[in-house]
Image (cartoon, coloured by chain):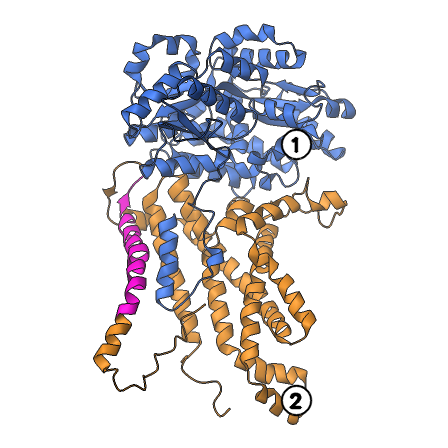
Chain colours: A blue, B orange
């Protein structure tokens, strides 16, 4: 980015034109919006670096794990740097391409990981996993799929299992006298009810686009079953034109047309948690979002979560649909890969972290305390020890949803390679804007298959 | 701000300055700038041009693929859409900024003290970074938590950034709000350069305020208008940060300017080849417009003060 723009600016100056420096693209390609660098490691350059996401309460746990590791291993300290979600996706790609990758690359596995593997940028961890059987043993088996490319393991599942769930505000439902939806038909019936009271039926951070995508993920599954998207993932020709896909795309447009989302949803951004605020302030009645939002709603929502006003459920079935209503989508885990460009010393420090402090009992307990199920089997045993009744019920729900799902699908934009994920998000934006019809959406997306 | 009127080095009165020696020293002085320009502008530009003929995902090896990127980008309607959006931003922000900046500049050129004080306030938006401005306006314009609902004003509670037409209007408003002070400053300086003898002569001839403005001030500002317009137009090609933070090109793709499209292709979809094609197109568009505007100005050596 930067070289291109710099070049244009200076080039124009050559032909006798100045361009105000104030319009220089300072925000683009420069330094990241970096918070909490160092992460309590006590300062000083570590031997390895770790890039991950900011956002409370997760970032505190991430920093704490690294701080504890650094304390125990003063000779092989690891530096942690935190980035905002949407900014991180681009930043880390650029850094890897420029040979400036961190030792430990945090990610979502799937298609993004595959692009690193194809470019030979990450270490094949298969034999290391074999040497440390404990690593696989303690994790949920469902987490390994997105870490695997061509039968080899290139990432370690870390952090938490986060399915997408349907949240609702119990207070608002009581106030309107509504019942939680049991089916897609119920959802469409609830929309005018809430609108009549001046309450947005659903809160949606539409500018982030992957948020809109969650609706399609569930509707595709509930209407046509998991095979519909699997065909896209497998690169089958015209896979987006499946009648079930077209029906799902049409249903979501019906919801938009019925004013199913809050006014101005197109400009709401997920990174600022404004969508969650709409739900806990009672401006919206429901929200489809990842399980990771529980912690921030508990922290920011006053007595919303602690007072038992937050309801949640798996996405309901669609009448006549083929999908199993126990299916879920989301992130089976988060993933960390090791850069193949890192020094041996750095790689060893990273491996040591992954086999010792990362996801140790202390960290798993911390995730539980913040309403998250870590990707390890021991997390299930810890639920019974939770004292807060609301947290306990929530954790049990997440555990059951994840472990009893017949299919736990990975988020589409993470599963697909970036060359398909970007046009996908793009077309989702236009679909929700009513700029394109379901048929046009399918046509546009069919063209990207195989790229 | 501009090298349009770079004065020629005046001939030295000294007889010692041999012609050869003089031109030698001038060439030497241009070297550092030339080196920086070659290193940071021409070289990367050639690199982008070369990349536009390759397939590269930004991570792995670079494969040359000939003109494949060019034909696919030129056949893609999203190129013309983003060119059109860029043109819209350019045109409307020019139409809004020019008259207001011109009038403000003339107003600020007056010698009264209150005008000097006001001029300082006008300057404030220019001191803020575009990203900070975007974040602030985004918060103020939020239809659920922003200024409108806060003041319980239905008029202010619009879907400002979620409606294609309103979003474009908001962008043009913010761009103008940010840059009018800068252009007003240019005009202020230019107005002060106009010889007062012209105004005295006009007053003797009985010309009123309006007549003086249209017959003296405006014609005398011809080159300033061209300079300021060039800055606005070429500057608007590079708007990225403001729009990226404010709407991210949305809703849909209704505010996706060429620079954003380039970023999306290169850093979102990992397609550096097509992104480089867009970068080259952006450079070409900028050059053509800038050269066109210079043409419009006629011969810059022509004096406007003939006979004064």
Within the magenta stretch, is there residue B38? yes
In the rendered structure, the answer to whether residue B230 lies left or right of residue B211 reads left
Mark 2 vs mark 1, CA separation in Å: 62 Å
Indicate the chain on which mark 1 is placed: A
Left or right: A255 in relation to A138: right
Residue A445, quarter of the rendered image? top left
Could one spot residue B129 in this view of the protein? yes
Q: Secondary structure at mark 2?
A: loop
Chain designation of label 2: B
Spot occupied by residue B281 in the image (x, y as percentages of width and height):
36, 56
Q: Nearer the viewer, residue A397 or A251?
A: A397
Residue in the image at 62% along x and 33% along y:
A275
Residue B207 marker: 2
Residue A294, x across and y down, in percent: 60, 22
Q: Position of residue A440 (x, y in %)?
A: 47, 40
Rendered image: mark on residue B78: none
Residue that badge 1 annotates:
A277
Q: Nearer the viewer, residue A342 or A135?
A: A342
Q: Secondary structure at mark 1?
A: helix
Magenta-span inclusion, residue A270: no
Q: Which residues are magenta?
A: B28-57
Are there few (<14), some (14-19), or many (20+) residues within 10 Å of tag 2?
some
The secondary structure that most of the magenta stretch takes on is helix
Where's residue B295, x and y in %?
A: 40, 74
- Vertical side of A305 occupied by B23: above or below: below
Image quadrant holding the N terminus of chain B, namely: bottom left
């Amino acid at each position: 980015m930067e070289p291109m723009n710099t070049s244009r600016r200076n080039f124009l100056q050559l032909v006798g034109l100045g361009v105000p420096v104030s319009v220089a693209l300072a925000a683009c390609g420069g330094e990241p919006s970096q918070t909490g660098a160092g992460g309590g490691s006590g300062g000083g350059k570590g031997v390895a670096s770790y890039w991950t996401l900011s956002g409370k309460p997760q970032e505190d746990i991430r920093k704490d794990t690294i701080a504890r590791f650094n304390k125990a291993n003063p000779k092989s300290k690891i530096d942690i740097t935190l980035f905002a979600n949407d900014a991180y996706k681009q930043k880390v790609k650029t850094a890897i391409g420029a040979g400036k990758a961190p030792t430990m690359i945090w990610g979502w596995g799937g298609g993004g990981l595959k692009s690193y593997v194809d470019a030979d940028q990450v270490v094949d961890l298969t034999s290391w996993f074999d040497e440390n059987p404990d690593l696989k043993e303690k994790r949920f088996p469902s987490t390994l799929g997105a870490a695997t490319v061509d039968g080899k393991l290139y990432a370690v599942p870390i952090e938490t299992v986060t399915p997408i769930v349907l949240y609702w505000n119990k207070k608002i439902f009581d106030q309107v006298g509504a019942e939680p939806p049991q089916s897609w038909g119920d959802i469409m019936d609830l929309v005018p009810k809430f609108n009549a009271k001046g309450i947005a039926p659903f809160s949606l951070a539409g500018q982030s686009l992957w948020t809109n995508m969650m609706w399609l993920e569930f509707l595709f599954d509930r209407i046509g079953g998991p095979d519909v998207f699997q065909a896209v993932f497998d690169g089958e020709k015209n896979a987006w034109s499946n009648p079930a896909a077209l029906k799902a795309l049409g249903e979501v447009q019906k919801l938009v047309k019925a004013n199913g989302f809050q006014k101005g949803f197109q400009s709401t951004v997920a990174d600022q948690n404004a969508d969650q605020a709409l739900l806990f302030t009672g401006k919206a009645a429901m929200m489809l979002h990842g399980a990771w939002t529980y912690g921030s709603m508990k922290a920011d929502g006053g007595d919303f979560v602690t007072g038992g006003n937050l309801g949640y459920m798996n996405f309901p079935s669609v009448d006549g649909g083929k999908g199993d209503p126990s299916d879920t989508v989301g992130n089976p885990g988060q993933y960390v890969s090791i850069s193949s460009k890192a020094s041996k010393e750095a790689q060893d420090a990273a491996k040591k972290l992954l086999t010792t402090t990362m996801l140790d009992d202390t960290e798993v307990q911390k995730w539980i305390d913040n309403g998250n199920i870590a990707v390890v089997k021991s997390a299930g045993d810890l639920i019974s020890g939770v004292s807060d009744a609301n947290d306990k019920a929530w954790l049990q729900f997440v555990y059951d949803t994840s472990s009893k799902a017949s299919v736990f699908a990975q988020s589409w934009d993470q599963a697909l390679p970036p060359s398909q994920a970007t046009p996908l998000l793009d077309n989702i934006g236009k679909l929700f804007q009513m700029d394109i019809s379901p048929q046009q959406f399918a046509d546009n997306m069919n063209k990207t298959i195989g790229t | 701000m501009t090298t349009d009127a770079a004065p020629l080095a005046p001939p030295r009165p000294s007889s010692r300055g041999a012609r050869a020696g003089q031109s030698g020293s001038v060439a030497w002085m241009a070297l550092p700038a030339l080196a920086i320009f070659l290193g940071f502008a021409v070289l990367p530009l050639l690199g982008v041009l070369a990349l536009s003929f390759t397939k590269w995902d930004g991570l792995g090896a670079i494969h040359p693929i000939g003109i494949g990127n060019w034909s696919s980008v030129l056949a893609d309607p999203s190129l013309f859409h983003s060119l059109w959006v860029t043109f819209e931003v350019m045109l409307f922000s020019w139409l809004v900024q020019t008259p207001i900046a011109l009038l403000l500049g003339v107003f600020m050129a007056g010698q009264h003290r209150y005008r000097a004080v006001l001029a300082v306030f006008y300057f404030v938006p220019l001191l803020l970074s575009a990203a900070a401005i975007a974040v602030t306006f985004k918060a103020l314009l939020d239809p659920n938590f922003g200024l409108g609902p806060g003041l319980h004003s239905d008029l202010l509670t619009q879907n400002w950034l979620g409606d294609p037409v309103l979003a474009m209007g908001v962008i043009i408003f913010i761009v103008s709000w940010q840059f009018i002070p800068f252009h007003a400053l240019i005009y202020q300086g230019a107005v002060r350069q106009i010889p007062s003898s012209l105004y005295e002569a006009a007053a003797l001839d009985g010309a009123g305020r309006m007549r003086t403005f249209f017959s003296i001030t405006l014609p005398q500002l011809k080159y300033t208008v061209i300079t300021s317009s060039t800055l606005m137009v070429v500057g608007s090609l590079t708007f990225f940060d403001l729009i990226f933070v404010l709407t991210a090109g949305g809703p849909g793709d209704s505010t996706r300017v060429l620079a954003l499209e380039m970023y999306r292709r290169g850093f979102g979809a990992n397609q550096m080849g097509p992104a480089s094609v867009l970068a080259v197109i952006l450079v070409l568009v900028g050059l053509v417009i800038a050269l066109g505007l210079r043409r419009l100005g006629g011969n810059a050596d022509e004096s406007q003060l003939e006979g004064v």
